Amino acid sequence: MPGIKETKISKIAFLIFLVTTTISCQKNEDTNLIKINSLPHSIREVSGITMLPDNHIYAINDSGNDNTLFRLNKKGEIINKLTVPKAKNVDWEDLAYDQENNIYIGDFGNNGNDRKNLRIYKVSGILSDSIVVTKIKFSFEDQKKFPPKKKNFNFDVEAFIYLKGNLYLFTKNRGSIADATTKLYKIPATQGKHTAKLIGSFKTCDDKSDCLITAAAINSYADKIALLTHNKVFLLSNFKKDNLFGGDIKKIKLHHYSQKEGICFKNDSILYITDEGTKHKKAGLYEYSLN
């Protein structure tokens, strides 16, 4: 039966061709986003990460979880858990840091755009295990109604950075308007109640299901800012003072879609990125090279 044998060989050869072609295409889509590890189940809803000079990654979960700050090694494994005293996780969404090794926890998740208890926790003494917490409360200068009309739902925040004594907040636009414009607000990084001043905005794209800002990070030289979406990074550089959108803005397509909500600089040329887990996939820790 030579005909049947030849047919089988042809089919096998065709399958090998398909597999080879598929792998080749996947490699072409790989833009240096490398998965380091799956994250433990206890941080499956990781919503923010940052690093301190101890070379550890710090992480938080978002709403529905407790007031825990997780210390991880560079493989994403939990070293220990730090309870943040006098703090409630209403909707923790991002972490920032300053040059004095303080971590800022952004409790400003605001899906319904109706919160009047927005706050940021400044956590000091982390490296000495003598934690002290102060509260930075704020409200938006341009929000008059709680909630506003659906088209004006642009008071949810999932991203912020510390820069020269101030905190800069980037909104996640949930409005009915088609574009994904993020607004930029500024508040002092000091204890008390403040008004968040609107100082800028940036239209990420026309599709708000594709370009909403979910996390932010700044490098140690304070001259690069990374803004994260579910499948992109916007890299800001050559900005001056408060005009963070006034310099160069590079859009980096990750060619990888997931619920990414955490980003920080490992060093000046490498980013750490995390995504949340789902029913079918564990949360993950990734590296992305900017070179």
Image (cartoon, rainbow, N blue to C red):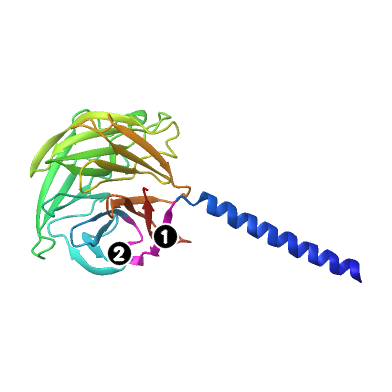
Q: Name which residue lies at 8% across and 64% down.
A: 130
Asked if residue 275 shows in the view, the reply is no
Say whether marks 2 and 1 touch (CB < 8 Å). Answer: no
Residue at which label 2 appears: 74
Residue 123 appears in view: yes
- The outermost residue toward the right is 1
The residue lying at 38 percent from left, 50 percent from top is 260
Viewer-nearest residue: 33 or 232: 33
Q: Residue at x 43, y 58 (%)?
A: 278
Position of residue 237 relative to residue 52, above or below, is above
Q: Which residues are magenta?
A: 32-46
* Mark 2 Cα-neighbour bin, 10 Å: few <14, some 14–19, many ≥20: some
| Residue 180 x %, y % | 38, 33
- Spatial CA distance of label 2 from label 1 is 12 Å
**Residue 188 drawn at (x, y percent):** 12, 39
Q: Is residue 36 magenta?
A: yes
Q: Is residue 147 magenta?
A: no
Q: Position of residue 174 (x, y in %)?
A: 36, 36
Q: Residue furthest bottom?
A: 1
Q: Disc 2 residue type?
A: Lys
Q: Is residue 133 left or right of residue 154?
A: left
Question: In terms of secondary structure, where does tag 2 sit?
Answer: loop
**Apparent side of residue 25 relative to residue 40 in the rendered image (left or right):** right
Q: Nearer the viewer, residue 162 or 223?
A: 223
Pointer 1 residue: 35
Place residue 218 in its image quadrant.
top left
- Note whether 56 is above or below 231 in the view shown: below
Quadrant the N terminus occupies: bottom right
SS of the residue at dot 1?
A: strand
